[in-house]
């Protein structure tokens, strides 16, 4: 079964209210050793995120008290943040969120695409924040014990008994014999898709070559 956000998420919601001050935000970051905090409204629904980058604009933006008519939209936004004193003024909005039932791979892809290291987890019904998913939580998947990986592979490969499997440091080596080369390729890709598998070494031999290799165009 594919792992979901709820399997690794932190149950502590690292958040501040919209009227939280600059010093309160820094205090929360230090207390929980994080690089960002979720900003929530009075109903505990995420409305944005304040990151260390947002706070650093206070020192790195020398033009925060002056505005140029030639500045870009991003520059205007950064100047506005640099002058902010509350979470609502400093935050990036809207908040990028995930739900406990989201597949962990999808959450990891969202982190990568949005270049964020943590995401607030919300209840899909109420929209309230119920936890936090950190990048380190996702990476924990790659430290799963070999027996857990093997169980995950068995769930995905019904005829796994026909092959010899070795697992070391998340790398799965599979040996055996199948009828067609396409079956060996499909087997390797299925195993590679199991959460926690770092790589697959496929040493499965085949009787028939049924994969067409198209030569490159000259």
Image: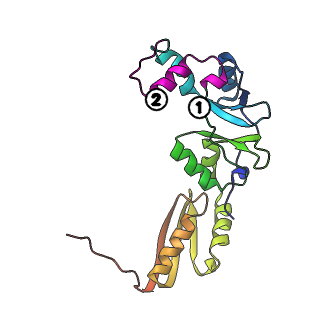
Q: Residues within 10 Å of mark 1 (few under 14, many from 20)?
A: some
Image quarter (top left, top right, bottom left or bottom right) of the C terminus: bottom left
Residue nearest the viewer, comparing 51 with 27: 51
Q: Residue 181 got which mark? A: none
Residue 125, how many percent across, how many down? Answer: 79, 49
Residue nearest the viewer, comparing 142 with 38: 38
Residue 128, how many percent across, how many down? Answer: 77, 40
Q: Is residue 200 magenta?
A: no
What span is in magenta?
66-90
Name the residue rendered at 68%, 34% in the picture.
Answer: 47
User: Which residue matches tag 1?
Assistant: 92
Which image quarter: residue 67?
A: top left
Q: Residue 73 got which mark? A: 2
Which residue is farthest front? Answer: 69
Dot 1 falls on a residue whose secondary structure is loop
* Callout 1–callout 2 Cβ contact below 8 Å: no
Q: Residues within 10 Å of mark 2 (few under 14, many from 20)?
A: few
């Amino acid at each position: 079964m594919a792992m979901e956000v709820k399997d690794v998420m932190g149950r502590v919601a690292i958040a501040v209210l919209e009227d939280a001050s600059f010093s309160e935000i820094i205090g929360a970051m230090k207390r929980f050793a994080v690089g960002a905090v979720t900003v929530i409204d009075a109903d505990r629904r995420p409305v944005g995120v304040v990151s260390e980058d947002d706070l650093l604009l206070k020192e790195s933006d020398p033009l925060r008290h002056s505005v140029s008519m030639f500045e870009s939209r991003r520059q205007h936004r950064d100047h506005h943040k640099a002058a902010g004193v509350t979470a609502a003024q400093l935050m990036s909005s809207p908040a990028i969120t995930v739900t406990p039932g989201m597949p962990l791979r999808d959450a990891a892809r969202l982190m990568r695409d949005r270049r964020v290291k943590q995401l607030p987890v919300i209840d899909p019904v109420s929209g309230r924040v119920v936890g936090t998913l950190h990048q380190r939580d996702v990476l924990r998947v790659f430290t799963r014990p070999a027996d857990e990986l093997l169980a995950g592979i068995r769930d995905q490969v019904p005829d796994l008994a026909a092959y010899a499997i070795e697992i070391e440091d998340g790398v799965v080596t599979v040996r055996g014999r199948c009828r067609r080369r396409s079956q060996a390729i499909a087997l390797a890709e299925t195993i590679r898709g199991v959460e926690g598998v770092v790589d697959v070494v496929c040493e499965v031999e085949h009787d028939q070559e049924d994969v067409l290799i198209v030569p490159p165009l000259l």
